[in-house]
Every structure is written in structure tokens, then in C-alpha cells.
Image (spheres, grey):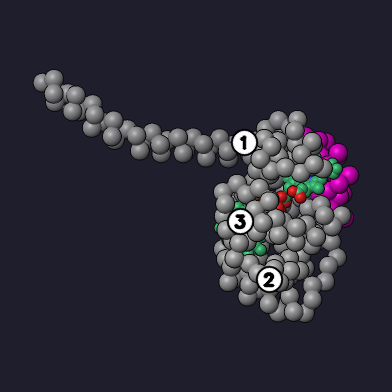
Amino acid sequence: MKTSSSFLISSQRVVTHPVAALFLCIAITFSLESASFAADIEAGKQKAQVCMSCHGPAGNSEIAEIPALAGQTAQAITTSLYHFREGNRKNPVMSPFAANLSNADMNNLAAYFASEKRIPAPYTPSAESLAQGPELAKKYNCVQCHGAALLGQQHIPRVSGQQHAYLLAQLKGFKATTRYDMDGNMSSAASMLKDNEIEILADYISGLH
Ligand code: HEC
Ligand code: HEC
């Protein structure tokens, strides 16, 4: 009697674990979804005024080294802000502006900037980049993760129509592993790029509208 009931308990435990894990996943997805759903665009817009001195009107950057935020995916913005705040991703200019943001601030800012329309800075890629860029973006799976039009998805940032100098610096940084990379995927993608391929990709991608 005793043995069979302890067997029952232990076999139940085996079953409970994956079920609990599944429930946990559902709970996390739910809270992430409701968090972004509950994000307050108006509050984000208020809080975003200070950001615009660098990231441009409505998040359309007019400075080559500073990324546009307008039309970026909300999750990519929240994720970046989180890593700046926690000191994982570091930048002497940007980090102080993330240091005191609450989770709600980050969600609201992300919802606001994601809702704005991207107006890419005027940029004309070379004929060589226009010819070779699409091929390279396929060859190195950029389109697999960043989406067919490189508009980003979930936590993977939109890169299409981004400031050229910023893109170039990030790609070089990933390759040199000096740019923080949350899961190692991007550094491993960049590690395969030759220097001239980085130039071509940054040139081509900045010109995408
Ligand atoms: C003084 C200028 C400055 C201000 C003000 C500023 N930023 Fe930044 N921000 C930067 C720079 C420079 C970078 C690029 C850092 C790097 O190269 O890693 C950046 C990067 C970012 C990124 C990462 C974008 C990406 O594509 O990876 C986000 C998100 C961001 N800033 C949001 C904000 C928000 C929100 C605010 C306002 C609360 C803000 N920034 C205020 C200069 C600034
Ligand atoms: C396996 C998925 C994956 C592949 C393949 C991939 N990326 Fe990424 N990329 C990411 C992720 C995830 C990030 C965000 C990393 C972080 O901030 O920690 C990122 C970030 C970037 C950034 C920085 C954007 C910003 O706003 O800061 C650029 C630029 C970029 N990728 C370009 C490329 C290019 C060009 C290729 C092809 C050569 C490529 N990626 C291939 C997943 C991928």
C-alpha cells in the first residue's frame, strides 16, 4: 500500500513538471501581452520629450550616430532600455537616460515610439550596395530573423531605414563582440561577415524605406 502510493506521488510529480512549465509559459506570455496592451501611449509621449533632443522629433533621428526609434518594434525598444538600465548594454551617452526608468515607463515609451511613423533620413546607397545587398541579406539569414523587409519582429529590431553610421557601428561592434548581444545570435551572424560585406549591408539597409 505504502509503496504504491509513493509510486503514485512520484509518477504524478513527473507529470506535474511539464504541465507546470506549460502553465508558467502561458502566464508569462499573458503578463507580457497584457503589459504591452496596458501600455499608455500618452504617458509614453510625455516621458519621451527628453529623448527627442537626441532621437529626433517623434523618434525620427536626424543625427547619424543616434538610432531612430519611430516605428521600431515595441519589444525591441523595451528590451534595449531594460539592458541599458541593468548595465548590460553600455553607452556613456544613452545609459544615464535609462537608469531611472521603471518597467511601466519603458513599456509606455516603447508603445509611444512604436506607434510613430518612421521617416527615414535621406540616404542614397551606392549602386554596388543596391545590387549586392539583397543577396547578402539572404545569404547571412538577416531576413530570417529581422523579417523579409528587415522591419523587425518582437525583440528583434527593425533595421530598415536606420541611420547609416549607427548601423555600421553596431555591425562592427557585434563582429568585434564589443556591442552587447542578449542571446549571442547577432554576434554569431556578424562574425561571418567580411569587412566589405558589413559596408555593403549597412549601406543597403539604410536606404530601405
Ligand atoms: C543625449 C542623447 C540621448 C538621449 C537624451 C537619449 N538617448 Fe537613447 N540613445 C542615444 C545613443 C547615442 C544611442 C546609441 C547607443 C549605442 O550606440 O549603443 C541610444 C540608443 C537608444 C536605444 C537603442 C536603440 C536600438 O535600436 O538599439 C533606445 C531604445 C533608446 N536609446 C531610447 C531612449 C529613450 C526612451 C530616451 C528617453 C528616455 C533616450 N533614448 C534618450 C542617445 C540618447
Ligand atoms: C538568429 C537571428 C539573427 C540573425 C541571423 C541576424 N540578426 Fe541582427 N539582431 C538579432 C537580434 C536578436 C538583435 C538584438 C541584439 C541585442 O540588442 O542584444 C539584432 C540586432 C541587430 C542590429 C542592431 C540594431 C539596433 O537597432 O541596435 C543590426 C544592425 C542587425 N541586427 C543587423 C543584422 C544583419 C545585417 C544581419 C545579417 C548579416 C543580421 N542582423 C542577422 C538577430 C539576428
Mark 1 against mark 3, which lies toward the viewer? 3
> Is residue 148 visible in this depiction of the protein?
no
> Is residue 64 visible in this depiction of the protein?
yes
Mark-to-mark CA distance, 1 and 3: 29 Å
The residue tagged 1 is: 35
The quadrant where residue 111 appears: top right
The stretch drawn in magenta includes residue 42:
yes
The residue tagged 3 is: 187
Mark-to-mark CA distance, 2 and 1: 39 Å
The stretch drawn in magenta includes residue 130:
no
- Looking at the rendered structure, the kind of residue marked 1 is Ala
* Horizontal and vertical percent position of residue 179: 68, 50
Q: Are the residues at dot 1 and dot 3 in contact (C-beta closer than 8 Å)?
A: no
Q: Is residue 79 above or below residue 166?
A: above
Q: Which mark is residue 20?
A: none
Numbered label tally: 3
Q: Which mark is residue 197?
A: 2
Mark 2 against mark 1, which lies toward the viewer? 2
Nearer the observer, 76 or 173? 173
Magenta-colored span: 41-62
Nearer the observer, 126 or 26? 126
